[in-house]
Amino acid sequence: MNKDLSNLREKLQALLLAQRDKSARGNVADYIPALAEVDPNLMGAAIATIDGDFVGVGDYQHAFSIQSISKVFGLVMAMNRVGDALWQRVNMEPSGQPFNSIIQLEWEKGIPRNPVINAGAILISDVLVSHYSASKLAFISFLRTIANDEDIHIDHDVFQSELAHGNRNAALAYLMKSFNNIEAEVPDVLEHYFTQCSVTMNCQQLAQSLLFLANKGVNPLNNTAVCTRKEAHRVNAILSTSGMYDQSGEFAFSVGLPAKSGVGGGIVAIVPNFGVICAWSPPLNSFGNSVVGMNFIAGLAEELGLSIY
Ligand code: GLN
């Protein structure tokens, strides 16, 4: 893909600098109390390309809570493990609801709308708990392998905070269990789910770990297949329609890239056949998406002509 990558560092720096005052327009997530302790003024961004180029600006090496970005990794692991059977238990449609909504789940008999809302990711956690003898270890090992970096860890304070304030997620899990769509014990499933949400990574690690989605399933850092081409296509399709929750339509309209956000303030955007962008700034808009992260990625996509549409 031909992009004008001259002065990429300067472009990234200028875009991030232009966001300096914008973070005040959002609020740091506090429904998980440990997340509210993060400095709202931190912000960083990085871009990694499948050709091996990398540029990071601002606080791009500062680790943050990946939260729902973990749903992408869990989904890939579950697809690798159970194949097409997965889609009997979870759908692939946008939900049109907030990420932690419970309303639709009863109407739809315990089948989550997609794997990147909370209900879907809890379902995926059940798949991982049921198919790995040590699913939390498998999850963190998977991240370290695809990021090519051992320095990726779980934030135990965030984990405890999520566990202590996880009633809504527990409700989603028990509701799915009542429809026989959860196999393992609910507390085990939730423990896995909160663990994967509590992983901390920085912009560089996130951008590099997801390069396989920009490269038809193959990690260009070591030329190893992480998933099949078809699976990479499917993950990108789901991220395009549902990765930014109930703002996915607006994100497609204004940016045009598969993307995933987390309430820790991170956003990753996949640019097929080119690379991955990661932007991070903790204050969120009402949809749970980083205010600065969205603006930054929109600006970069516009400047480099990255839209897939
Ligand atoms: N751990 C968070 C939760 O379950 C993840 C939500 C998010 O990042 N959107 O509520």
Image: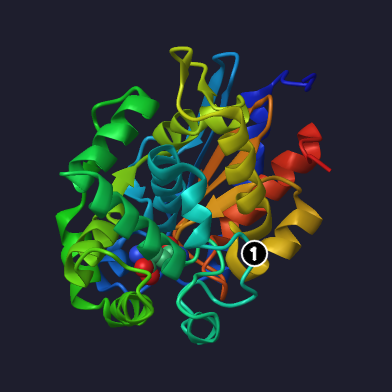
For the residue pair 80 and 13, the one nearer the viewer reads as 80
Instruction: Please tell me whether mark 1 sits on a helix, a strand or a loop.
Output: loop
Give the residue number, with chain letter if any, for mark 1. Answer: 93
Give the residue at x 68% y 31%.
Answer: 272
* Residue at x-position 16% and y-position 44%: 134
Tell me where residue 193 sits by quadrant. bottom left
Q: Is residue 181 left or right of residue 96?
A: left
Determine crowd level at label 1: few under 14, some 14-19, many 20+ residues with C-alpha closer than 10 A.
Answer: few
Quarter of the image holding residue 142?
top left
x then y, percent, for residue 246: 63, 70
Q: Quadrant of the C terminus?
A: top right
Q: Residue at x 66, y 48 (%)?
A: 237
Image location of residue 218, percent across then percent down: 53, 21
Labels in figure, total: 1
Q: Is residue 286 above or below residue 215?
A: below
Inspect this view and state whether residue 19 appears: no
Query: Which kind of residue does numbered mark 1 sit on?
Result: Glu
